[in-house]
């Protein structure tokens, strides 16, 4: 059964704010610094001992706070904090949880930038990382060590579209007192990882959350204690590294957030249609909404009701050369754009092993089961998805792939 107890779309509506000027859209506050009525109030704010005042925009500002409240409502968390990129959210969340000598267990199928950070960067800090298949719970259990502080995974993996069992991963993390961090970028509203057991949820809001590919942004959602530690002026990773989101962008994302549920429904509807049609013409589509997908049952058990199975599909054309010819022809025919990223209102497609996962060494790509000819689709909001598929099929036939 899908999760009918939590409705992230209605949770967002419950925190809608009227601006100080009585406008129905949030006001943009572009102040970098803020004044105080008394010197002691400033001191108390520095120490995190007062509410209703803002210190400096690297810490909080009214625009970012409004977006953070809405995101926290969407995730069912006590608090959230927004960043200038998805990687800003991912790296700050991880670094807040670990120090020299600690250990991280991470999914080997994570986004390429995350993999590069974990595989290359954190080693400089004396932090050990073990990569495993997080859909194999026994592998995760075996990888855990006494000094494991984080288990890191994606709800739906990029680009292989495997589904994590959040509840079971939380149980494993708890055996060592570790934090379970879940990247939910592919499946906002469809999954609520915190409700399912994650300690911390991270996003690249650049993707589906914002939906327009007109900005880069990220978010960290967690309990109040973690968010407060993250932005502590003394030792908070986010406060001291400074990946703050611009107020203008924050305000525009907040407005887009209120259409996210409608967009996810349409992305999912279109992706399901394409996946079924691909299979009908002999091209195997990797899509969790299909009963043939190995994680279909698990996804159905964990997902929130009413948002579908997501807008991401992958197909395998065996070689990068074949994939490139196909994608180039689709772009010429107006199917969408040969471009990285996802969650846009137009369909985007890329060859993951040569683009967004290129940071992952080829031997690990093979271990993951990623073909060099894997084409990842971020399916758009097309009103006539039947016509879109007719163009895709035409491209396949021109190239004699079917």
Image (cartoon, rainbow, N blue to C red):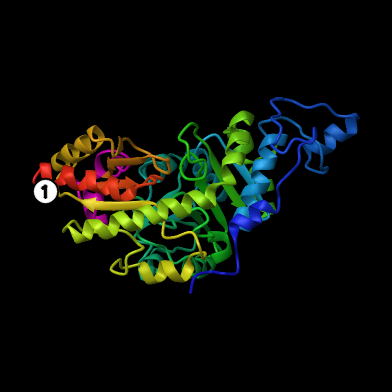
In-front residue for pair 71/60: 71
Above-or-below relation of 185 to 138:
above
Tell me if residue 332 can be seen.
yes
Query: Looking at the image, can residue 108 be seen?
Result: no
Q: What's drawn in magenta, residue-wise? A: 353-374
Q: What is the x, y in percent for residue 296? A: 36, 68
Q: In terms of secondary structure, where does tag 1 sit?
A: loop
Residue at 55%, 65% (x, y): give it.
Answer: 197
Looking at the image, residue 302 lies above or below residue 314: below
Quarter where residue 344 is shown: top left
Q: Which residue is mark 1?
A: 401
- In the image, is 77 to the left or to the right of 214? right
Q: Residue at x 25, y 57 (%)?
A: 277
Q: Position of residue 104 (x, y in %)?
A: 45, 54
Residue sitting at x 59%, y 55%: 9
Whether residue 15 sits left or right of residue 180 in the image: it is: right
Image position of 72 (left or right of 391): right
């Amino acid at each position: 059964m899908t999760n009918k107890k939590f409705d992230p779309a209605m949770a967002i509506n419950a925190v809608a704010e009227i601006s100080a000027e009585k406008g129905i859209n949030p006001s943009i506050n572009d102040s970098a610094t803020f004044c105080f009525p008394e010197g002691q109030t400033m001191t108390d704010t520095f120490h995190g001992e007062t509410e209703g005042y803002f210190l400096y925009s690297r810490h909080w500002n009214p625009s970012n706070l409004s977006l953070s409240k809405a995101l926290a409502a969407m995730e069912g968390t006590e608090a959230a904090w927004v960043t200038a990129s998805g990687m800003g959210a991912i790296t700050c969340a991880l670094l807040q949880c670990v120090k020299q000598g600690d250990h991280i267990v991470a999914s080997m199928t994570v986004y390429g930038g995350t993999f590069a950070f974990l595989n290359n960067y954190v080693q400089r800090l004396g932090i050990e990382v073990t990569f495993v298949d997080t859909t194999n719970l026994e592998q995760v259990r075996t990888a855990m060590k006494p000094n494991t502080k984080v288990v890191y995974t994606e709800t739906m993996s990029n680009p292989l579209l495997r589904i994590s069992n959040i509840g079971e991963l939380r149980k494993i993390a708890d055996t060592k007192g570790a934090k379970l961090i879940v990247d939910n970028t592919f499946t906002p509203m469809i999954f609520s990882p915190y409700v399912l057991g994650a300690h911390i949820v991270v996003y690249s809001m650049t993707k589906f959350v914002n939906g327009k590919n007109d900005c880069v942004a990220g978010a960290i959602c967690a309990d109040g204690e973690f968010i407060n530690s993250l932005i502590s002026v003394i030792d908070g990773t986010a406060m001291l590294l400074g990946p703050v989101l611009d107020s203008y962008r924050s305000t525009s994302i907040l407005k887009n957030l209120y259409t996210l549920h409608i967009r996810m429904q349409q992305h999912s509807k279109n992706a399901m249609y394409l996946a079924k049609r691909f299979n009908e013409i002999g091209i195997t589509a990797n899509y969790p909404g299909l009963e043939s997908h190995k994680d279909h049952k698990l996804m159905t058990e964990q997902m929130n009701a009413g948002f579908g199975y997501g807008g991401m599909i992958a197909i395998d054309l065996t070689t990068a050369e074949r994939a490139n010819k196909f994608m180039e022809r689709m772009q010429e025919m107006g199917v969408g754009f040969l471009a990285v990223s996802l969650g846009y209102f137009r369909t985007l497609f890329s060859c993951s092993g040569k683009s967004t996962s290129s940071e992952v060494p080829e031997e690990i790509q093979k271990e993951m089961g990623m073909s060099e000819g894997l084409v990842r689709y971020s399916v758009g909001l097309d009103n006539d998805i039947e016509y879109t598929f007719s163009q895709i099929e035409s491209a396949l036939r021109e190239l004699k792939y079917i």
